[in-house]
Image (tube, rainbow, N blue to C red):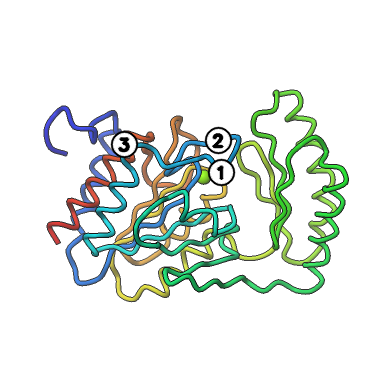
Amino acid sequence: MNGSNTESEAGLVAEDAQKLNSFFSTFGGRNKSLLLLDYDGTLAAFRVNRFTSKPWAGVRELLHAIQRQDRSHIAVITGRPAIEILPMLGLEKAVEVWGLHGAERICEDGHRELEQISEQAREHIASLHEQLRRDSLGGLLEAKPNAAVMHWRGASAEKARRIEERTLDLFQRYLQFEGFRLLKFEAGVELRVGRDKGGAVEAIMNAQAGNGPVAYLGDDLTDESAFRAVNACARPHMSVLVKAKRRESAAEIWLRPPAELRAFLKQWLEAGNQA
Ligand SMILES: [Mg+2]
């Protein structure tokens, strides 16, 4: 870290700052670095209306500079449908986006792939959507091809507790079916089939040849599988919990958004310049 008033010293734990410096010292080989990012809560603040969550001030410009530098492969891995991300991110050049927690992928050239799930699983999901459209149990249903998601962000604690209880009661009946999993996150729960964010991270690392350094940044419980996938890889790696308050996590370091996130991206850019 340079200077005493830079954002990078906004409060980063000394041990984490040291880990970051060692990570960035691995930049400079022939291979591109992989910058893997969650969206909500990581690049942008949460909004009850999820279509209004723009990146934090300065984040778009930093990502744009990293793109122009052309030393990194950037991918966003989100729980949302992938198509929602690029318009909100607002970059001049598209990045790879994995949606639905890894079940869906839109490549930089716009090509879209959706993980195939069995006919039977699809029918279960469709009937669950139908049931929740009739009665959303007090929450907000988000219907995805491979999942049903119940949101209660913004509800009072008492109301949230009741929605969660009723939703879990319903979702648990589906866990007897093959491949179905519960994915709890902040202010919601998802019942889903198929690849998770960790699977998406593995797929990206397999597709991006070489052993360039890789980082994954995320905030939610759904990011833990991605942290673990990054921690287990043979490349130089860094898993980053981006969150105002620290919590138990597989992530190697913790950054508080947005200042420490901006500092991280600036350091990424500088490390690429030296490469
Ligand atoms: Mg998130």
Q: Amino acid at mark 3?
A: Glu
Mark 1 Cβ inside 8 Å of ligand 1: no
Quadrant showing the N terminus:
top left
- Of residue 17 and residue 141, the one placed in the foreground of this image is 141
Residue 179 pos. (x, y %): 72, 65
- At mark 3, the secondary structure is helix
Q: Find residue 260 and name its label.
A: 3
Which residue is tagged 1? 51
Which residue is tagged 2? 47
- At mark 1, the secondary structure is helix
Distance from disc 2 to disc 1, alpha carbons, whole Å, reads: 8 Å
Q: Position of 185 compared to 142: left or right? A: left
Residue 52 pos. (x, y %): 53, 40
- In the rendered structure, which disc, 3 or 2, sits on the residue that comes first in sequence? 2
- Report the residue at 81% width, 64% height from top: 177
- Report the residue at 14% width, 62% height from top: 275
Distance from disc 3 to disc 2, alpha carbons, whole Å, reads: 21 Å
Q: Amino acid at mark 2?
A: Arg
Residue 137 pos. (x, y %): 83, 38
